[in-house]
Image (cartoon, coloured by chain):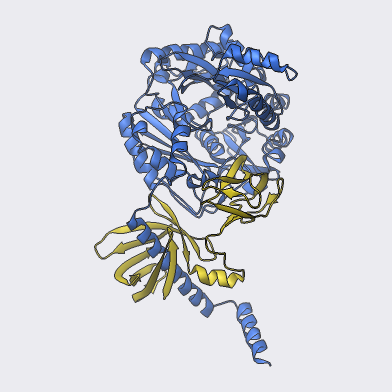
Chain colours: A blue, B yellow
Amino acid sequence: MACDTTRPVPSKVLIANRGEIAVRVIRACRELGLGAVAVYSDCDRNALHVRLADEAYHVGPSPASESYLRIDAIVDAARRAGATLVHPGYGFLAENAAFARACEDAGLTFVGPRPAAVALMGSKTAAREAATSVGVPVVPGTVSPLPADASDAAILAEADRVGFPLLVKAVAGGGGKGMRTVMARADLAAAIRAARSEAQSSFGDAGIYFERRLVAPRHVEIQLLADEHGTVLPFVERECSIQRRHQKVVEESPSPALTADVRHRMAEAAARVARAARYTNAGTIEFLLDRDGRFYFLEMNTRLQVEHPVTELVTGVDLVQWQLRIAQGARLDVPPEQALSPHGHAIECRIYAEDPDQGFLPSPGLVRALAVPGGPGVRDDRGVAPGFEVPVFYDSMIAKLAVWGSTRAECVGRLTRALDEYRVVGVKTTMPFFQWLVRQPAFADAAFDTTYLDRVLADRNGQPFVQPTAADEEGAALAAALASWFRAHRAAAAGAAEPAGDAWRRAARREALRSP
Amino acid sequence: MTFEVDLGGRTRTVSVESVGAVGPGGGRFRVRVDGQPRTVDARATDLGLLLTDESGRSIDVAVTDRGAGEWLLQLPRVALTAVVDGRRFRRAAGGPAPAAGEQRVTAPMPGRVVRVLVKVGDDVAARQGLVVVEAMKMENELKASKAGRVKEVAVAEGTSVESGRLLVIVE
């Protein structure tokens, strides 16, 4: 290879993640002329992110605790690759202050906030205090974590003060883990026990606190970028009220429920919290919005969000490119009005390898082929390719389908069309669920809150999401018979030209049968 | 060739006969579905088969062979599972044919049994939870597809199970 000595060697970014988000970061690295280094576990050796990267390092066996969560192995891979930046993606080590610190100690630039900001916002109760200190309202609840040895009487008194119904939440929580809804006093003790044990096993921290459950709130959040020179840039909001068991499944921007006035006040409040935390890089401040347009700070996510594409689609700002630029000391020069004024509407669906007709049971397996939608306004962020076995070890999200339209109605029509085009062949996915959801009048009217999906799913009581028509069944039966016909003919053709070994074995078997 | 196709709770008898030369890329077929004759053009695609009938209506089917006669058929809007010549495969497997109306609940993926919710002799309602299996960071409750009585519980809490492992039989 010829070496161009006039050009400096590009910096390399190690991506401490897998799946679609690793692919997303690799794309941003390429666009900025940065090198992309992947890491992988045993089962991800041929994963798409490994195939797309310039180089890839093995970090351990398939279970996440032995590979993608191994701080030492990942820092070591960065050192071996000569990477100078580390992008954590989301999940795994993305909100782990010890990882951010380990990168710093190893002389690597962590693409995210400083460890102190990660630690501050990682404690849900400390984050609530930070919001309160700058005059941003929080959902009413306990100020500090409930001590492990608190008496039953003290716990009950605290619960009565917060008021029922309430949520028991993990101090170190996230993703709905360690969270319980309690409707009445009688159910409190059992919910606390369950939340503590789940929080201990998920986060290694049994700390819990109470939060009042608002009536039918919407989940609305503000994306932020902040550089190291003091600029904090809030973006137009995202609405993520369509959740199943506290996990977002559909996100959109802008929120159909927000007035421009509330948007500006919410963005301003989010920027205040970020400044109070001396926050840098990309982050998101989550709020609950009540029916009267009042909003309450919920928590801050100190990383890139799964749903960042909808913000990119309506603002034209590439958030991942900016994460990398900010980490290298660049000044944020996006005009504030561009970030806050949405152009059109965007909706994203998180597509999981789960069978929605079997209670969303994971459906891992081999992706045999893919039909991916294209055409106007369609963006597909995918972490799998044909020939890849969706592993059982990680979250089962395989792709995000995000669609843009000039209006929300146009966007919903386009999303419906794109979902119908999308086929992940070989594994069951949540596509039928989305095909059903986007055809619901409540979805078209955006008449939903965070309780909507769990409520309608309970009412459906397991009914299939898409009912096959008689023509569908007839076509499928025909296809199965014809495929069986082709297989029988291929087998016959292969038999005529079978390998010598097989022919020899069959001849031997015939001999054995003839001998008596 | 004639196939028995089980799909959507119904068995169809489908006979298939090629019309003229048929290559690996496909061709034309005379088929009979439960005696009803039709002509179908079947072409191989990257996903499976594109079927077109006499009137020009076509259907693009993604076809996955799951072995033992089971096929996954993913149509543009709906996925269906068919079993072709199921009786032959059950005989070939050598096991006893499952008793009529018996539900054999098996692990749909590798994981760990975290809770067994029923015991032998329990009456269960349709959609009642039987066993909770943890896999892919999620707890998944496996439910009875219809009402019955628990005949056998084949696993204990804490057991690691492979995909396809028998968990519970409901009769």
- Quarter-wise, where is residue A437 in the image? top left
Q: Is residue A128 above or below residue A477?
A: above
Residue A46 at x, y percent in the picture: 60, 50
Q: Which one is nearer the viewer's eye here, A295 or A255?
A: A295
Between residue A130 and residue A319, name the one nearer to us. A130
Res. A498 image quadrant = bottom right
Say if residue A54 shows up in the picture. Answer: no
Residue A113 screen position, x and y as percent: 61, 21
Q: Could you say which is closer to the camera, residue B102 or residue A68? A: B102
Position of the C terminus of chain A by quadrant: bottom right
Outermost residue, bottom direction? A516
Residue A398 appears at what percent x and percent y?
52, 43
Q: Taking A354 as reference, is A333 above or below it?
A: above
Question: Can residue A440 be seen by looking at this rendering?
Answer: yes
Q: Is residue B76 left or right of residue A167?
A: left
Q: Measuring 57% from the left and 9% from the top, which residue is drawn there?
A: A132
> Residue A2: x, y in percent?
59, 44
Q: Relative to residue B3, is residue A202 depicted above or below?
A: above
